[in-house]
């Protein structure tokens, strides 16, 4: 419920305004002079101040200046019986949202109030966005607001300075390679290469050659000697992604590398000493592969000296919105305003279970940024399955619930659409059905207004 402070030295105006606004379910506080208003705004917070301009000894302009000096995000509407352009311009320059001339029409005043509150909400959203962009617990490009990810960051800090082998566990799309890169970047090997290899992407002969190299003539097509990744990563780090997909024959050779710190190129009898730190990642529990005979138990214990587990995104909802803002920061050019998120979008993002984890979230936000209208990401510019999942959660109620419970369970998106429709109709009524004037009043394009009006082409 929005809190509104009314300031006017005319008791009749205060009474009328208070009655009208309370009827609209606003929380209203009244002040009969400017000094009382200053005392109230210093001790309490308001979403909107509606103040007369001409008062003594403290007038509305002084109240506006006090709010501005305090850095308040409170919207301000000025009331004046002196509707001169000069008075209006002065108030607007000082940060007033709008002004209303006495005597005012109730409908017009309510529309102005709604617009002022919407503006205040947008400003607050942008302030929250900036705060979240400066996430308190951010490790390189790893966003960590949840306890689980804070623990991951702590482990990175502790293990990075060592040469210990690390096994990173987590579902696909959770950022396992990002964690591996962070470990390398904060290690003593950071000035040397970080070389990743996807063990699931290459067939056995190619994977062996990729990792250990080969000599000329080792197999058909081996026209020259090739240096493998373990040699190339000397002094640096090699990252073995999807280690669970590595064939058993290569697992044995990897075990020797970890034990003896030496490799043998394919087709050669000569051993070569290597000094590469090994980081590995898996999206399936290696213990289950051991039971199935698909992974060597001795290699598992060599790899998992330090295990780091990354939970799926659905288990760390605290990270979702900070991740959204992190994606915006990467995708939107510096100096350009970030789009705001509609309230139902925020709720949907946190309710969706994200089977693709952070990678899926990143793709969804990129999609939203691309198709955002009026610099605002709404549900209709996100992948439909994200909004559909939240609506299913919002509308799932037992059939024997009382009507009031069914109303509470209505999806947020449906509720907001109904509210928007009612608001648009009120604005149109106030302009006598003039859509162009209505669009200007709403500060949207005429095309946007037509899109939002049901039945309009």
Image: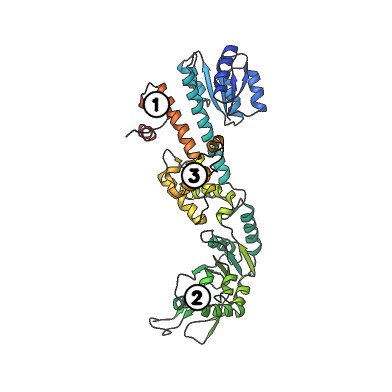
Mark 2, Cα crowd under 10 Å, few <14 / some 14-19 / many 20+, is many
Q: Indicate the position of residue 245 as horizontal and vertical percent values.
A: 51, 72
Mark 3 or mark 1, whichever is nearer to me:
3
Which residue occupies the foreground of this view, 369 or 392?
392
Quarter where residue 294 is shown: bottom right
Q: Which residue is mark 1?
A: 438
Mark 1, Cα crowd under 10 Å, few <14 / some 14-19 / many 20+, is many
Which residue occupies the foreground of this view, 397 or 121?
397
Q: Which of the labelled discs sits on residue 391, or is there none?
A: 3
From the viewer's perspective, tell me whether residue 420 is left or right of residue 53: left
Q: Which residue is mark 2?
A: 211
Q: Indicate the position of residue 232 as horizontal and vertical percent values.
A: 51, 73
Whichever of labels 1 and 2 marks the residue nearer the N terminus, that label is 2
Which residue occupies the foreground of this view, 264 or 322?
322
Say which residue appears at 45% left-offset and 72% top-offset. 202
From the viewer's perspective, tell me whether residue 108 is left or right of residue 186: left
User: Is residue 258 at least partly visible in the picture?
Assistant: yes
Quarter where residue 436 is shown: top left
Mark 1 or mark 2, whichever is nearer to me:
1
Q: SS class of the residue under badge 2?
A: helix
Whichever of labels 3 and 1 marks the residue nearer the N terminus, that label is 3
Most distant residue in the bottom direction: 269
Q: SS class of the residue under badge 3?
A: helix
- Quadrant position of the C terminus in the picture: top left
- Quadrant position of the N terminus in the picture: top right
């Amino acid at each position: 419920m929005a809190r509104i402070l009314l300031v006017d030295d005319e008791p009749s105006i205060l009474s009328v305004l208070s009655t009208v606004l309370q009827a609209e379910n606003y929380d209203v506080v009244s002040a009969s002079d400017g000094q009382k208003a200053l005392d109230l705004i210093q001790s309490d917070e308001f979403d909107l101040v509606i103040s007369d301009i001409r008062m003594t000894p403290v007038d509305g302009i002084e109240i506006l200046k006090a709010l501005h000096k305090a850095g308040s995000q409170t919207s301000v509407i000025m009331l004046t019986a002196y509707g001169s352009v000069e008075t209006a311009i002065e108030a607007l320059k000082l940060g007033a949202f709008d002004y209303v001339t006495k005597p005012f029409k109730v409908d017009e005043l309510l529309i102005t109030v709604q617009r002022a509150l919407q503006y205040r909400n947008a400003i607050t959203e942008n302030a929250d966005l900036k705060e979240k962009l400066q996430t308190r617990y951010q490790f390189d490009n790893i966003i960590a607001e949840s306890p689980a990810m804070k623990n991951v960051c702590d482990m990175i800090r502790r293990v990075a300075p060592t040469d210990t082998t690390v096994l990173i566990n987590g579902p696909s799309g959770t950022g396992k390679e990002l964690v591996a890169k962070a470990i390398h970047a904060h290690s003593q090997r950071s000035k040397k290469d970080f070389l990743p290899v996807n063990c699931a992407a290459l067939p056995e002969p190619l994977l062996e050659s990729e990792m250990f190299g080969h000599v000329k003539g080792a197999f058909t097509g081996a026209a020259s000697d090739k240096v493998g990744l373990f040699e190339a990563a000397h002094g640096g780090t090699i990252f073995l992604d999807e280690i669970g997909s590595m064939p058993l024959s290569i697992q044995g050779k990897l075990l020797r590398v970890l034990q003896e710190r030496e490799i043998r190129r394919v087709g050669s009898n000569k051993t070569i000493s290597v000094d590469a730190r090994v980081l590995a990642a898996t999206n399936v529990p290696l213990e289950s592969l051991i039971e199935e005979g698909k992974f060597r138990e001795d290699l598992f214990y060599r790899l998992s000296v330090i295990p780091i587990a990354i939970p799926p995104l659905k288990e760390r909802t605290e990270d979702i919105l900070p991740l959204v803002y992190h994606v915006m920061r990467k995708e939107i050019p510096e100096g350009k305003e970030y789009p705001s998120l509609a309230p139902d979008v925020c709720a949907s993002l946190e309710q969706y279970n994200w089977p693709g984890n952070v990678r899926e979230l990143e793709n969804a936000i990129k999609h939203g940024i691309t198709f955002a209208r009026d610099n605002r990401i709404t549900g209709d510019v996100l992948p439909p399955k994200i909004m559909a999942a939240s609506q299913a959660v919002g509308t799932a109620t037992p059939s024997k619930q009382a009507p009031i419970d069914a109303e509470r369970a209505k999806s947020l998106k449906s509720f907001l659409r109904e509210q928007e429709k009612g608001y648009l109709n009120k604005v149109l009524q106030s302009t006598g059905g003039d859509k162009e004037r209505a669009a200007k009043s709403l500060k949207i394009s005429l095309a946007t207004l037509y899109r939002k009006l049901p039945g309009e082409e």
